[in-house]
Structure formats: structure tokens, C-alpha cells
């Protein structure tokens, strides 16, 4: 009898987490450094925001404050040293520390991304299981709707939903909070955000749900044709148990890889959605920072984006680890 | 499904090519009395011109006692016989320009840009991937790592960053070239990675050894003998990249970093239509959204039909 491969020990897990953390750090450093250098080396700088009639001493002061008189590499070095102490510099556009701005914007984007991911998962995965495991009119109809949703990218879904919202008035057509809710207290504010959240979250979630549905469907179809499913049926396992406990769990492996990609897609999509629906998130902030050449804000936003990306890929790996015993037990197939 | 997708794509390309003939009016002609006009209802051989009832409320009414004759197949597919009263099949935008005409001409700009960007990306990606796959070793390692780094980044942010750090206001010709360059810079790793895998596995085949024995140099081996193996992959990638680039141009123009408003592209038209209060009353201004949707749908139909994974964007 072939010897079973030894299961993963704690040491394996520690090594794995260490490697992923190193990768995350490298990614954040690379992304933020490139963003900083790109903003620095590009034509024009943040002093153009001061206007053509700014006083020379104001321009000089701004240049000095944002280290524009140092060489790009020396500026990068200085920023990196301070960033290691979590001091990300100041924003020229907002005239306050970058760290606070990034924290709030990243929180808003995270709320949006989590909501969209939850909706996409709850919609896409079950529908994918349905279409992947049976034929017939229902499956064909779901497939058709899915194909249509797949073809409406976040730019179009957000425009469409804003149009519907402004026509029907069911939901607020943009922003994260209404003007009236500012002084109203914590629970009223939460309710207000909850009313503003569905529009951008749906705009992000619909194409993603369609992608999940398509991929789950394909993974399901492949799994269902494997011999162990036929064996289980012959043993008398009920259809529902077969579907969930046997077929779906086996199909999870390819889905978990997609979750890592989904984080990237969420970040990409969230920029457009945030812009169209005026959701005050990281994408919007980065866009404004780029336009104004606000160099430390750009670097901070890029670093945060890198953190999101690395986090997403670690989560995907952990999901795979938890879901698939074959990975846990160290087998290669 | 695949044939439906192909037919749709061919129809869209036909529309782009035949735009000047299909459009009743030139795309930049401003009809001052027709700002935000609704679509004209065409009654076969005539239509009623519109008169402003309230400029503030943007309300129009039909002038029923003066029908204007419609000409079919005279210079254009369909056009108004009276030069001052235009046939606005999809209404007019905030400057009084014919939305239908701008949509058709916009298809030229958007599709042309995306097609050229796809071509450049293919060439660049195939070149880098081919070199990496053929050379192997350190060259392969460095190029692959670099490609992986670019791939992990969300594409729209890289495009946005690269565009935003260029001068913000540029003439349309320069914007066109700049966008093609940026899209190619962001798109090449996708192509390169696949080509590298194909070339790396083909490299060990006998016909390569035979060619080398016959005296072919590495460049000839790569370009003439090895690259055709990647043909199918390149075709699939091109089909997937085209709508991605159309969307990227639309997004950039929508946020104001693409073409200026005077150039009709689907992105600038969406930007024009982005006034929320207005859009609720004038849904025809979202016509470019339908156009983009049709292109993406056509590509997805073609790709789905062959059982490949769908567009993950």
C-alpha cells in the first residue's frame, strides 16, 4: 500500500505564513516605490495646483515641504524610512497627514468590497452549483442572465443603477451619507450608510456574481463527471448530500484560486464605481491625488492598495488550505 | 452562441466602417435649438421637427403642421431633406449634437483605438514571451518575475497612474498614441506569460533541433518556426483584450483623462451623460453604454461558445 504523505505540521503553516508576509511586504514596497517615483519623474508637480499666479515664496515653501528639491531616489529613501515608522507624510491637497486620510478611505473601500464580495458569493456560488449540475430550462435561463450580467462591466452597472435610482427614488443615487445625517448620531449614521451601500455594492457585485456563477458552473460540471461521484451514487448517497458534500467540496479548489483574482477585480472595479456613485473610497482618493500630483498621498494610496492585494491573495491561499484536504495533507494532485 | 457572437461582432465592425454613410448628420454639428432634444419619431417618409416649449425644463413639442421629408439612400442611409431640421434618431446632447451620429463615429474611435492597442500588445507580448520562453534561464526568470509583478496590479490603476502623470490636456492625436502605448504597457504580461509557456514547451521538439542543425539562427527559429505554435492562443487573447481596452478607454474618458469632449468616443459621450438629474429624464444619452455592452456581450458569446473561461475584469 502506498505510504500516505505526512500531514502539514505547525512548522509548515508558520513557514507558509512567513513566506506570504514576506511577499506582502515586498509587494507593498514595490508598488508604493514605483508610484512615488512615477509621480516624481512625471512632468509637472504639485506646485502647479497653486496656480500660475502663485507667489514664488509659496511655491518654494511647497517644494521644500514636500522634498521636491531632493533627488527622486533620496526622496524615496526618506519616505521609506519614515514609512517604516508609519509616518506617511502630509497631503498637499488636503493639508493633513496622509495616514488619517488613507485610513478612512481604505475603510470605506473595504466596506464596499466586503459587501460586494458577500453579495457576489451568495448569488453566484449557489446559482453556479445549480447550472453546473443539471440541464433544463431553469439552468439555461440562469446561464443567459449570467452571460448578460457578465457583459455589463462595473462602469455600466453603476451608470445604470444610478439612472434607475434617480428615476425611481428607491435608493439614494450616490455618496456614502446624506447631508441630513451628519449630526444625527451613530445609529442613524449607520442606517444612512446602509441605505447608500446597496447601489455601489450591487454595481460591483453583479458582474462578479456572474463570473463566480460561470466558474462554479464549469468546476461543478467537471467534478460531476468524475468516477467517485458515480461510485457515491451507486452507494445510495442522496442527490443533495452528493451535490454539497462530495461534488461541491471537490470543486472548491479551482474556485479558491478565483477568489484571489476576485480581490484584484474588486479593486479595479471599485475605482469606477466609487467615481460614478461618489463613494469616498481609496480609488477616488488616489485619482484625485494623481491628478494633483500629491506625491505622498499617491504613495500612501499605492501602499494601501498593495496591502489589499496581498491580503486578498493570502486569504485565497488560506481558504484553499481550509477547504481542500488534499492541500492540507500535502498531496500534489 | 458562438455564431451569434461572431455575427454581432461583424455587425459592429460594419457599423464602425460605414459610420459616415449610416449617420444622418455630422457628429460635430451643433443644432442650437435642439439642446437635449428627445429622439425624433420617424414615420416612414417624414417626421415632425421639434420646437422648444420651455428651455429651462427642456421640453419640446412636435410642429405638426410642417412635416419634413425624409430621404432614404441619398448620400446617407437616411437623412432629413431640410438641412435646418435634423433627424435625431437618438436625440441630441448638451451641445445639440446628434447622439446617433456621435455613437456611430464613436464606434470608429473606440474600436480603432482598442484594435490598434490590441495589435501592439500582441506584438510586444509575443516578443517578450517568445524571448523568455526560448532563452530560458536567467532571462526567462527576470522577465517572468517582472511580468508577474505587473500582472498582480489592478490594471485600471496602472493605466490611471500612467495617464494621470502625463500632461492632463493633450490634443486628440497625442491622446490616441499615448493611450495605445499605455494599454500595451499594461497588457503585454498577459500575452507574454502564455506565449512563454508555449514557446518553452515547443523549444524541445524535433523540428527545432532540425532547424538548428540546418543552420537557422535563434531569431529565425523563434519568429518563423516557433511562433506559429502560439497562433491559437494569440487569437484568443486578442479577442479577450479588445473589450478590455474599449472599457479602459471609456473609463479614462469618463473621468476626464481620455479624449476631450469634442472627439466623439463612447467614453466622452458617457461623460456627457453623467449628470445625474438629467440622466433620469434623458435615458437615450446612455446609448453608448448599450453599445459597449453589445461589444462585450459579443466577445463573451464567442469565448463562451468555445468553453473557455469568461472575461474576468
Image (spheres, rainbow, N blue to C red):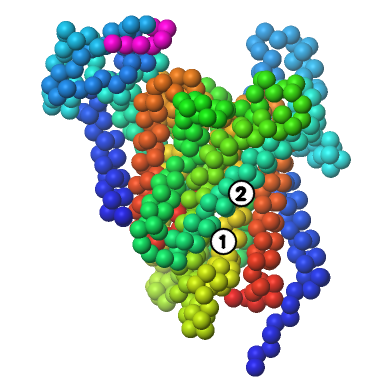
SS at badge 1: helix
Q: Chain of mark 2?
A: A
Q: Quadrant of residue B143?
A: bottom right
**In the rendered image of this protein, does residue A85 appear above or below residue B34?**
below
**In the rendered image of this protein, does residue B227 appear above or below residue B184?**
below
Left/right of residue A41 with respect to residue B303 in the rendered view = right
The circle on residue A255 is: 1
Point out residue A238 in the picture as x, y percentages from the top left corner.
Answer: 52, 75
Which numbered disc, 1 or 2, marks the residue closer to the eye? 2
> Which segment is the magenta one?
B55-61
| Of the image marks 1 and 2, the number of the one nearer the N terminus | 2
Q: Quadrant of residue A96?
A: top right
Neighbours of disc 1 within 10 Å: few (<14), some (14-19), many (20+): some
Q: CA distance from mark 1 to mark 2?
A: 15 Å
Task: Give the quadrant of the C terminus of chain A.
Answer: bottom right
Point out residue B303 in the picture as x, y percentages from the top left corner.
Answer: 38, 55
Left/right of residue B248 with respect to residue B301 in the rendered view = right
Left/right of residue B136 with respect to residue B79 in the rendered view = right
The circle on residue A320 is: none
**Residue in the image at 75% along x and 64% along y:** A16
Point out residue B82 in the picture as x, y percentages from the top left corner.
Answer: 17, 12
SS at badge 2: helix
Task: Give the quadrant of the N terminus of chain A.
Answer: bottom right
Task: Find disc 2 in the rendering and name its residue.
Answer: A118
Neighbours of disc 2 within 10 Å: few (<14), some (14-19), many (20+): some
**Residue in the image at 37% along x and 46% along y:** B297
Q: Are marks 1 and 2 on the same chain?
A: yes
Q: Chain of mark 1?
A: A
Amino acid at each position: 500500500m502506498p505510504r500516505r504523505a505526512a500531514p502539514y505540521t505547525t512548522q509548515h503553516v508558520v513557514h507558509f505564513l512567513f513566506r506570504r508576509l514576506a511577499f506582502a511586504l515586498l509587494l507593498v514596497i514595490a508598488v508604493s516605490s514605483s508610484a512615488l517615483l512615477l509621480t516624481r519623474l512625471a512632468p509637472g508637480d504639485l506646485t502647479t495646483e497653486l496656480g500660475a499666479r502663485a507667489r514664488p515664496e509659496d511655491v518654494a515653501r511647497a517644494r521644500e515641504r514636500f522634498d521636491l528639491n531632493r533627488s527622486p531616489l533620496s526622496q524615496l529613501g526618506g519616505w521609506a524610512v519614515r514609512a517604516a515608522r508609519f509616518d506617511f507624510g502630509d497631503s498637499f491637497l488636503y493639508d493633513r497627514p496622509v495616514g488619517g486620510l488613507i485610513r478612512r478611505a481604505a475603510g470605506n473601500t473595504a466596506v464596499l468590497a466586503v459587501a460586494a464580495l458577500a453579495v457576489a458569493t451568495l448569488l453566484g456560488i449557489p446559482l453556479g452549483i445549480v447550472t453546473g449540475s443539471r440541464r433544463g430550462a431553469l439552468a439555461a435561463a440562469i446561464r443567459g442572465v449570467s452571460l448578460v450580467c457578465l457583459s455589463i462591466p462595473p462602469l455600466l452597472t453603476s451608470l445604470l443603477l444610478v439612472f434607475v435610482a434617480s428615476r425611481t427614488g428607491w435608493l439614494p443615487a450616490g455618496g456614502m451619507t446624506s447631508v441630513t445625517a451628519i449630526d444625527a448620531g451613530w445609529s442613524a449614521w449607520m442606517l444612512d450608510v446602509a441605505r447608500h451601500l446597496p447601489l455601489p455594492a450591487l454595481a460591483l457585485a453583479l458582474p462578479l456574481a456572474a463570473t463566480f456563477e460561470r466558474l462554479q458552473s464549469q468546476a461543478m460540471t467537471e467534478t460531476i463527471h468524475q468516477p467517485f461521484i458515480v461510485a457515491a451514487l451507486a452507494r445510495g448517497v442522496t442527490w443533495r448530500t452528493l451535490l454539497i458534500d462530495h461534488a461541491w467540496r471537490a470543486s472548491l479548489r479551482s474556485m479558491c484560486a478565483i477568489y484571489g483574482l476576485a480581490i484584484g477585480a474588486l479593486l479595479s472595479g471599485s475605482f469606477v464605481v466609487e467615481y460614478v456613485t461618489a463613494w469616498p473610497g481609496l480609488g477616488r482618493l488616489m485619482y484625485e491625488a494623481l491628478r494633483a500630483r500629491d506625491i505622498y498621498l499617491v504613495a500612501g494610496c499605492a501602499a494601501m492598495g498593495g496591502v489589499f492585494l496581498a491580503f486578498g491573495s493570502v486569504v485565497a491561499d488560506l481558504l484553499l488550505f481550509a477547504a481542500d484536504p488534499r492541500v492540507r495533507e500535502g498531496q500534489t494532485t | 452562441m458562438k455564431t451569434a457572437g461572431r455575427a454581432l461582432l461583424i455587425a459592429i465592425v460594419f457599423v464602425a466602417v460605414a459610420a459616415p454613410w449610416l449617420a444622418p448628420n455630422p457628429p460635430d454639428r451643433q443644432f442650437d435649438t435642439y439642446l437635449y432634444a428627445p429622439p425624433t419619431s420617424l414615420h416612414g417618409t417624414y417626421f415632425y421637427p421639434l420646437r422648444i416649449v420651455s428651455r429651462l425644463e427642456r421640453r419640446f413639442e412636435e410642429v405638426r403642421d410642417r412635416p419634413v421629408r425624409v430621404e432614404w439612400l441619398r448620400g446617407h442611409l437616411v437623412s432629413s431633406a431640410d438641412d435646418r431640421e435634423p433627424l435625431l434618431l437618438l436625440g441630441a446632447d448638451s451641445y445639440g449634437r446628434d447622439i446617433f451620429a456621435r455613437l456611430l463615429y464613436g464606434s470608429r474611435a473606440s474600436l480603432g483605438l482598442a484594435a490598434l492597442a490590441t495589435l501592439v500588445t500582441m506584438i510586444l507580448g509575443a516578443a517578450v514571451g517568445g524571448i523568455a520562453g526560448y532563452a530560458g534561464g536567467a532571462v526567462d526568470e527576470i522577465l517572468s518575475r517582472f511580468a508577474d509583478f505587473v500582472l498582480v496590479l489592478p490594471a485600471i490603476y496602472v493605466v490611471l497612474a500612467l495617464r494621470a502623470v502625463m500632461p492632463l490636456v493633450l490634443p486628440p492625436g497625442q491622446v490616441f498614441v499615448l493611450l495605445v502605448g499605455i494599454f500595451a504597457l499594461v497588457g503585454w504580461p498577459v500575452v507574454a506569460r502564455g506565449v512563454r509557456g508555449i514557446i518553452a514547451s515547443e523549444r524541445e521538439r524535433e523540428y527545432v533541433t532540425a532547424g538548428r542543425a540546418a543552420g537557422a539562427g535563434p531569431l529565425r527559429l523563434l519568429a518563423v518556426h516557433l511562433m506559429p505554435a502560439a497562433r491559437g492562443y494569440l487569437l484568443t487573447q486578442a479577442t479577450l483584450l479588445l473589450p478590455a481596452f474599449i472599457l479602459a478607454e471609456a473609463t479614462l474618458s469618463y473621468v476626464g483623462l481620455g479624449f476631450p469632449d469634442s472627439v466623439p468616443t463612447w467614453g466622452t459621450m458617457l461623460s456627457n451623460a453623467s449628470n445625474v438629474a438629467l440622466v433620469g429624464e434623458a435615458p437615450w444619452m446612455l446609448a453608448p453604454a448599450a453599445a459597449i455592452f453589445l461589444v462585450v456581450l459579443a466577445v463573451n458569446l464567442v469565448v463562451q461558445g468555445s468553453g473557455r473561461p469568461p472575461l474576468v475584469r
